Image (spheres, grey):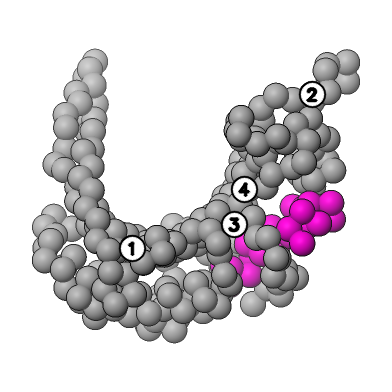
Amino acid sequence: MPRSTSHKYRNSPIVEAVCEFRFAAESRYDVLIYGLVFDKVKSRYPNRRTRQQISLESEVGEGHVQQRIGNPVTTIQFVSEDEKSLIQIDPDKVSFIRRSPYVSWEDFRQEIRRGIQNYSSVVSGRKLERIGLRYINRIELPEREVKLTDYLKAVPRIPDPQAPAVIRTWAQRQEIVYTENSAVMTVQAGSINDEEIDGAAFLLDFDYATAEIIPSFDSVNGLIEWLDIAHACIEIMFEASLTDTTRQLFD
């Protein structure tokens, strides 16, 4: 397993952590599953919310594109009393979400383990298509105009040395392949336009997910072991992205 060099910050920049399990689509989905799962988790997630989403499907023919409205998709959220922890269930995926304040990986990891055990006791035998662990960080800086290299190791560059040095908005994205883990990490960063704060702010987003080949998992322990590796890789990349000046903002 990769060795993480991260430590717990007093003011964590994590605004949301998401662990998602995506399954192969099924032609029929029993909505009674929602109620059966809720019965198992309602002591920790007592609030239940329902959302209906409408999909738009496109079909490309000869010389034309035909669009039609797909069937509505029901999404259920089970929410903790403090609104910080959620289980979200869609027909083809289940997600475990932790919002700020983020406590620790050990705490979130336990919620994922408990949640996937409860879900699997109701829904079994479905083929996994993707597993993902995502951390979204919001970093606020003390001044409106800053030198990005003072805070981030990897930043966008201006090729013209005579161009103005101030960048109003910026965004960047990289996909990093972890061949030994059959995984890909998507790293996204970009500025935030927030008039309610005095300084600048940007997002730092890490999404570590299985690649096309899904590893074989014989048990919940196997899933958790994979997630431990994913978390360690995200922590390493997070720390490698920061300067000491940025770390001081969190302590």
Q: Secondary structure at mark 1?
A: strand
Q: Nearer the viewer, mark 4 or mark 1?
A: 1
| Distance between the alpha carbons at the discs numbered 4 and 3 | 6 Å
| Distance between the alpha carbons at the discs numbered 2 and 4 | 21 Å
Q: Categorize mark 4 by other alpha carbons within 10 Å: few (<14), some (14-19), many (20+).
A: some
Q: Secondary structure at mark 3?
A: strand
The residue drawn where x is 42% and y is 73% is: 112
Q: Nearer the viewer, mark 2 or mark 1?
A: 1
Label for residue 14?
3
x then y, percent, for residue 234? 62, 62
Nearer the N terminus, badge 2 or badge 3?
3
242 and 172: which is toward the camera: 242
Residue 125 visible in the picture: no
Q: Are marks 2 and 1 in contact (CB under 8 Å)?
A: no
Q: In the figure, 138 relative to 211: above or below?
A: above
- What segment is highlighted magenta in the picture? 229-251
Q: State left or right for residue 98 relative to residue 170.
A: left
Q: State left or right for residue 166 relative to residue 184.
A: right
Nearer the N terminus, badge 2 or badge 1?
1
Label for residue 166?
2
> Looking at the rendering, in which quadrant would you find the N terminus?
bottom right
Q: Main secondary structure of the magenta part?
A: helix
Nearer the N terminus, badge 4 or badge 3?
3
Q: State left or right for residue 152 relative to residue 48.
A: right
Q: Categorize mark 3 by other alpha carbons within 10 Å: few (<14), some (14-19), many (20+).
A: many
Say which residue label 1 marks: 79
Q: What's the amino acid at mark 1?
A: Val
